[in-house]
Amino acid sequence: MSENTKNVKSTIPTNSENSNTTTNATGNNFIHNFIDEDIKNGVYDADKIMTRFPPEPNGYLHIGHAKAISINFTTAEKYGGRCNLRFDDTNPVKEDVEYVDSIMEDVRWLGYDWAGLYYGSDYFDQMYDCAVKLIEKGVAFVDDLSADEIRELRGTLTTPGSESPYRNRTISENLELFEAMKSGAFKDGEKVLRAKIDMSSPNINMRDPVIYRISHNTHHNTGDKWCVYPMYDFAHPIEDAIEGITHSLCTMEFEDHRPLYNWVLESLNWPHAPRQIEFARLGLTNTVMSKRYLKALVDEETVDGWDDPRMPTISGLRRRGYTPEAIRDFCDRIGVAKANSTVDVGLLEHCVREDLKAKVYSKNVIFDPIKVIITNYPEDKMEEMEMENSRDNPDWGNRLVPFSRELYVDGSDFMEEPIKKYFRLFPGNEVRFKGAYFITCNEVIKNEDGSIKELHCTYDPATRSGSGFEGRKVKGTIHWVDAKTAVAITVRELGYLMIDDEENPGMYKINEDSMETKTCYAEPSILESTAGDRYQFFRHGFYVADSKLYRKEAPVFNSIVGMKSSFKI
């Protein structure tokens, strides 16, 4: 494991910075106010508002991208406009078709559909022509300096930069050299094309930025047609302008790049140029959303892929059992802000819990099982007890669950020496077995090592649920499964992949205990499941049949989100 994944720094400010700037994503917000102002002033037509979601296909989308997707698509929808999906694929070294396919799948899964599907590489010819125009105008030049030399001459925030010795090449020389770059006459890094702006600008992004570089690498979309590629800051405004984007919505780190965005379009005399508007990116507690770090986790096999259910990727959240409705609800609740902040991951989990409880059936599943033998129950008898399919949806009716003399109960539902206010099973205590009978614990049978082998209990036949008995009350109700028909399942309890590093405040570290695998016992109807099915495991939380590992002969379930417990040991 590299240092990157061992100790990931958290650089997100505290939530207090966002207290006065958050607005609802689907209601009025500062982005919509800017658009309303542009429409009022006649800058853009009200019925022609266009946005775009422009990911670089160099990794899988994560929950932070879900916020950007939501803002772009819902803004277009609000104005009856259109939103494109565009892959900003200007760097062939890092990009791959695998990422393109995954991004399209994720956007569709979230419930959005794009007006047009485009690639930045679709416009390489036009971008090259635009670069030539800038050379012809005398505002771009070919530079022989290396990346390190350019960096050394750039200056600092308090000192101006120095001009390249190649800055004053003639237009004809620059055109000839740029054509030679395109034809493959030079090696990677041997020459670049730079914009000629202002080396003393207080904005370092305006100090003669590189706009084209050489890269002899096969591109996923254009193959080996090109060996020169535009830089993002040059390509992005041109892409937006070609597609007729009216409002280029991006995260706050691009605020300092906005002057360069505008300079490119102004230098090209582009009519009806888009307006760039920045919003705060999403920060989430116990979560790292840097593609670089996430890729390191995958490459070093710290996780089992981009869709590992502990990952914050959309594919990981999907595999974990999160719903697109819950993620969209979360994006709506956190709203749109200018100031970066950190949102408690508990809010996301709350949205998931609220969505799932209205959608999933309940199942009895026993964790850390203890066998219960009802000594006065007939050995050859088997009953079917009616159990509600959902406490939150009574209209869903009931299911039948087998019940016999030997059962399993949760290990947490028994204490040999109970603590105060413990109302579950303990010697001499009576509880209700949910949907069945009142059960009294009489004797604890132990193994030679002192561990519990089984509990011997008795039942009251008159207390069967629905039999109409009166006057009898118990304080504890617990669930169970029949031992003869129980199905052994594998349950993967998932925690946070990243946790605070107590030795290094402000830093995250890998949680080595982020996954705990258990063998549990479930009611037999669990075998009706298919991969991706979600359930509420009664009193435990919400779980999903793993989309990759689930088999009827070896069922595997992942925890989605827990339930708020009324009692914690």
Image (cartoon, grey):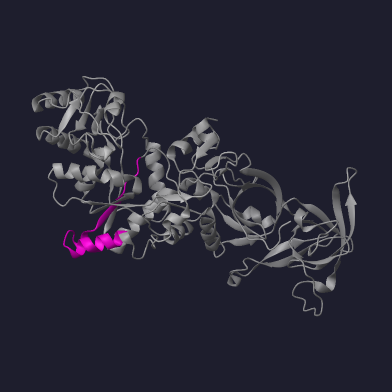
Q: Residue at x 17, y 22 (%)?
A: 180
Task: Give the side of residue 26 with respect to residue 268, left or right.
Answer: right
- Image coordinates for residue 147, horizontal then vertical, percent: 30, 26
Query: Where is residue 429, by image quadrant?
Result: bottom right
In the displayed structure, 60 sits above or below 381; it is above
- Image coordinates for residue 348, horizontal then vertical, percent: 51, 56
In the displayed structure, 76 sits above or below 557; it is below
Task: Give the side of residue 531 with respect to residue 329, left or right.
Answer: right
Of 522 and 61, the residue lying toward us: 61
Task: Give the side of residue 393 with respect to residue 249, left or right.
Answer: right
Query: Where is residue 209, by image quadrant?
Result: top left
Task: Give the side of residue 474 with respect to residue 567, left or right.
Answer: right
Span shown in magenta: 31-56
Q: How many marks?
A: 0
Q: Residue at x 58, y 72 (%)?
A: 395
In the displayed structure, 162 sits above or below 438; it is above
- Is 331 a magenta residue? no
Query: Where is residue 226, by image quadrant?
Result: top left
- Image coordinates for residue 350, horizontal then vertical, percent: 54, 60
Quadrant, the N terminus: top right
- Is 38 a magenta residue? yes
- Image coordinates for residue 337, horizontal then vertical, percent: 38, 57
Quadrant, the C terminus: bottom right
Of 40 and 479, the residue lying toward us: 40
Of 428 and 133, the residue lying toward us: 133
Residue 488 appears in the figure: yes
